[in-house]
Image: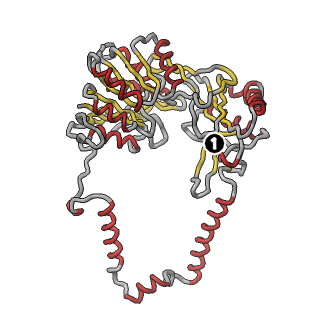
Amino acid sequence: MYLTAKCCRSVMAVRPNIFYLRRTCVLFSTSVSPADGGRAGSGSQKRRKKRQKKAAWTGDLSWEERLADAVTPLWRLSYEEQLELKQNNQRKILSELSGSLSADLRGVDGNPKTVGFYLGTASRGNIVCVNGDHLLNMPEKHTLVARCYQDFIRQSSLEPCLLFHTGGHWREVTVRTNAQGHTMAIVYFHPQMMTAEEVAVHKAELVEYFSRGPGSVCQLDSLFFQESTMTRCTHEESPYQLLHGQPYLHEEVLGFKFRISADAFFQVNQAAAQVLYNTVRDLCVPGAAQSKTGGTLLDVCCGTGAIGIISSPRVDRVIGVEIVEQAVRDAAHNAALNDVENCEFLPGKAEVVLPALMSRLSSAPGALTAVVNPSRAGLHPKVVRALRNQAAIRRLVYVSCKPDGEAMRNFKELCCAPDQEKKLTGEAFSPTLAVPVDMFPHTPHCELVLLFER
């Protein structure tokens, strides 16, 4: 397996590695060894553990030594060694207690008004926020905005909102940049019991800081503000308020231009995104770059329409489905921006829209190909069922950022034998080609593009 990387500023464009899978693929084999008696799972693991425990009693220890190990397990150590061991154990216990009693989510310097990334876990009470200035995958503009936002909240009279139930207002900041260096910052704020007039005062201070104050060094093209009492919410649930600058960023991929809203998903690594989208397009509608295959491309979880629009010259029609309404508006705008007239984008949850849409697609002329690009949570079971049971879909491309997570359940349900209980009655797919694309240099993660055929 070969990886060829080309550095492009703070991103890396990586040539994808292609793995061909025979149609008699055994990716999901559950074969077990004869030693387990043909049974796999927790039962065999428990039996192995029991055998291991029994093995511990078959050594050369006398019964007296075994009893001493059970009753006085430190008897082989000198008393000084025993005291040292107990000292270290108690230090660990007290350290954990100290961490749980101190304020959670503080910065390395003890200041709770720290902007960075969390380390630790809430269950252990050892969460700390660390600046990410030194990280290789952080563009300089992002670290600059983070530092300025930290300086702003540290001089603010309001406390940070670390845990919703403990009060505070300033929350995280999201920074987005495009290949041209244009920058969008989104500040999230918990209003608690503040009136609109009180919130307006602090919004004005934020604008002043980033437009004319010390934060102006960031040269923000867009500054958004969202008041939210939830961890995450859409524009429809709580509008993104444009406080300063332009309402959108624009990005260009493979010669197509795209408008990006504050809450719309778009790949953050533009150089690698070109590799990804070119790979997906070639798997969805293989053929020469200028040739037209025809048929319909169904783009599930289409976002701002990138895959569908890039693939549109090769097909007769593109139908996209997306849950984020603003992203659907962006997709329609992007189609018009690129003079693409054969794309239609539908808002709504895929599990709601898709079953009804399938009846329309059954009578559509030409081949029907599906491409899905869901979040880490994977596809809803109803979506998998609708795709599996639509006989007209002979080719399906799955783009996954976490193939070892919930997506694996989707893979298995697309490829398993018909299952009446799960209402998976359609002919099974087979995985025939896999292409990993490195979208996230310096991390173990990558996007996996899987081609399923039947």
The colour style of the image is: secondary structure
Give the residue type at disc 1: Gly
x 36%, y 14%: residue: 313
| Residue 419 located left or right of residue 99 | left
| Residue 454 located left or right of residue 320 | left
x 24%, y 59%: residue: 39
> Where's residue 48, x and y in %?
31, 67
x 27%, y 36%: residue: 431
Q: Is residue 326 visible?
A: yes
x 29%, y 36%: residue: 19
- Callout 1: SS: loop
Quadrant position of residue 448: top left
Q: Quadrant of the C terminus?
A: top left
58 and 243: which is toward the camera:
243
420 and 211: which is toward the camera:
420
Vertical placement of 260 versus 338: above or below? below
Vertical placement of 106 versus 420: above or below? below
| Residue 79 located left or right of residue 401 | right
Residue on which the image places disc 1:
116
Q: Is residue 209 visible?
A: no
Quadrant position of residue 438: top left
> Where's residue 120, x and y in %?
58, 53
> Where's residue 84, x and y in %?
59, 76
| Residue 321 located left or right of residue 282 | right
Classed neighbour count for the residue bearing mark 1: other residues with Cα under 10 Å, few (<14), some (14–19), many (≥20): some
Q: Quadrant of the N terminus?
A: top left
Vertical placement of 354 versus 70: above or below? above
Residue lying farthest to the bottom in this orientation: 64
